[in-house]
Amino acid sequence: MKILLKKKPQNPIIIEGFPGFGLIGTIVTEFLIEHMQCEMIGEFLYDDLPAMVAIHKGKLVKPMAVHYSKKFNIIILQTILNPKGKEWDIAEAILEMAEQVKAKKIISIEGVASQAMMSDKDTQLFYFGDDALKKVGLKPIDESIVVGVTSSIMLKHDDAVCIFAETNSALPDSKAAAKVIEVLDKYLGLKVDYKPLMKQAVDFESKLKTLMQQTTKTTEESDKKYMSYLG
């Protein structure tokens, strides 16, 4: 597992949001890529994850890609693959890339489950790693279990910065994602309007659910074919 870059911008901020609870990170990165005039500058190279690409509106969507906003000097990591089982390798590849480009910081976006949260209650946001996030309204996270790529980065990178959005939905949660983008806007001075995300929520959720369902279906069909080869 490694990341191949066509361009190596220097001293950027890296934002990663891999599929997790509520698909918060996936929605946030997808929205930022579309609204920050990003270009694809690289991709993850691997041979131990499902061989799959997606086609959306007639265009090829790389399953794990690196996008860059020159205007804000921000690298955004996007994936539609489930990284289960490869979290350590992916984290290592991200940290190697961060070293190549001398990244200022790595910001991880995650959803955290909340059974107590009601649908009509405002989404709670929490942070880890940078007290400057307290100034934009976030609370430090005191108790939680973090899994996935973000946890691997936290364990390998002493200066990890994380934003956690509370959600009670295993389905895409655009409302919580919009709150994260609002915070990122204030924290990084992006001047990106998060309101369109609320208007586009249905389209975003439909698109992401379709991509994730197709990913799961493709993996299951691939497993069935493999088993049939074995008899």
Image (spheres, grey):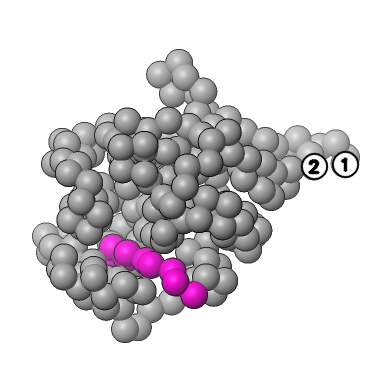
Give the side of residue 129 with respect to residue 154, left or right: left
Q: What element carries label 1?
A: loop
Quadrant assignment, res 184: bottom left
Whether the residues at callouts 2 and 1 have beta carbons within 8 Å, the answer is yes
Give the side of residue 72 with respect to residue 149, left or right: left
Q: Name the residue under label 1.
A: 230
The residue at 53%/41% (across/down) is 8
Q: Main secondary structure of the magenta part?
A: strand
Q: Return the residue found at the far top.
A: 58
Q: Mark 2 points at which residue?
A: 227
Q: Return the residue found at the far bottom.
A: 142
Q: Magenta region: which residues?
A: 158-166
Q: What element carries label 2?
A: helix
Between 215 and 35, the one lying in front of the other is: 35
Give the side of residue 157 with respect to residue 135, left or right: right
Number of residues whose C-alpha sits closer than 10 Å to that of mark 1, classed few (under 14), some (14–19) or many (20 or more): few
Type of residue at label 1?
Leu
Between 146 and 217, the one lying in front of the other is: 146
**At which x and y percent is residue 73?**
36, 44
The residue at 36%/36% (across/down) is 70
**At which x and y percent is residue 53?**
58, 30
Residue 191 visible in the current orientation: yes
**At which x and y percent is residue 219?**
63, 41
Q: Determine which of the numbered discs, if any, sits on residue 106 in the image.
A: none
Type of residue at label 2?
Met
